[in-house]
Amino acid sequence: MSLADFRSLGRSGLIVSPLALGTMTFGPSAWGADEATSRAIYDAYRSAGGNFIDTADVYTGGESEKLVGRFIAESGARDEVVLSTKFGFNGAGRGNPNAGGAGAKNIHRALDASLRRLDTDYIDLYWMHVWDGVTPIEEIVQTLGDFVRSGKIRYYGFSDMPAWLAMKAATIASERRIPGPIAMQLEYSLVARDVESEHVPAAREAGMGVVPWSPLAGGLLSGKYRRGNTADMGRLSGPNPFGNSKFTDRNWAILEELEGVADELGRSPAQVAIAWTLGRSSVVSTLVGARTSTQLQSNLAATEIRLSDAQKQRLDKASVPSQGFGSEVTWAHIRRMVFGGHDVTGWGDGRA
């Protein structure tokens, strides 16, 4: 596999690389990279054949969008790049509830601001960064569908939302013959497989591609953290969205198995963790970020790895998610019961 082994994103004609460049590190922040370093990361990704660039209006206070827009414009690659950004979080200041969320008022405000910062006329893929829990999905689908029809965005998708919400959106769009979502962006890694229960089946049924974020679990799966020594070693050591939730006995056991497979392959744990994610049948493109171009090159090398069936099974077994009702493990067991012990597969099981 290479970055030029392009794939269609969901049931659409949008063609993307198997690894997307996440640019949350572009610009000043606790984990940020300055402009020169950000440019080197962007250039390295593009030189390797990648075409999928992901940012958001709240990344580094809007600076990420500005840098991404500048790099794309200066390289003259706007038609070649699949540019995605996000809306939803309130980055315009406290006190104004309409400067966040998924209501039509905020989506209009956020999109216009992102277009200015990115210095472009349109966004290829516009993500709802998170559902606000308030705005009716009918309003969201109508607003984003109108933007597709106007040409301001080409496609849209949802990030970090309930599976039922995404499925309802796809159903409404289909029934009303208006543009619907083509992708889900979800936390998905060896230590975060809960989405396999509801989100992945919903994505298959609705024709949405899955785009994992944090395939390294905030750095845990890179091997930089050790049990009993997790301080001052990276992103998970300070303020972060995960807190201390990644430092569990289960996750340390998964890391140990991952490191065993990595040793067999002569690769880093991070590369093997990304390769595992890339190999999931529902995954179209996986987000990878970096603070240096060297770090990026290491992550991109994951496309060279081919895990054996035995190695996949070891990693799958070590990281098996909760087997509550609705998990793929449970459904597989039910199918065997229903079909007299046979492993019958459906059309959405990666068979076609």
Image: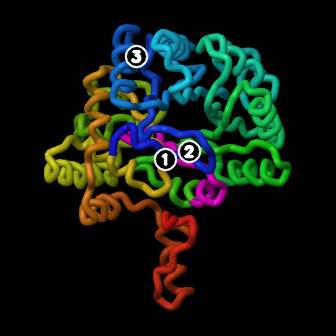
Q: Residue at x 69, y 28 (%)?
A: 153
Q: Is residue 89 magenta?
A: no
Q: SS of the residue at dot 1? A: loop
x and y, in percent, of residue 275 in the image: 32, 47
Of label 3 and label 1, which has the lower sequence position? 3
Q: Is residue 60 visible?
A: no
Find numbered disc 2 in the image and state the secondary structure of the residue it sits on.
Answer: loop
Residue at 66%, 34% in the rendered image: 128
Please name the residue shown 57% across and 14% down the image. 62
* Residue on which the image places disc 3: 32
Crowd rating for badge 3 (residues with CA inside 10 Å; few <14, some 14–19, many 20+)? many
Q: Earlier in the sequence, mark 1 or mark 2?
A: 2
- Residue bearing mark 1: 284
Of tags 3 and 2, the one toward the viewer is: 2
Colouring rule applied to residues: rainbow
Which numbered mark, 3 or 1, is in the foreground of this view?
1
* Amino acid type of the residue that numbered disc 3 sits on in the rendered structure: Gly
The magenta span reads 201-217
Q: Residue furthest bottom?
A: 340
- Give the residue at mark 2: 9
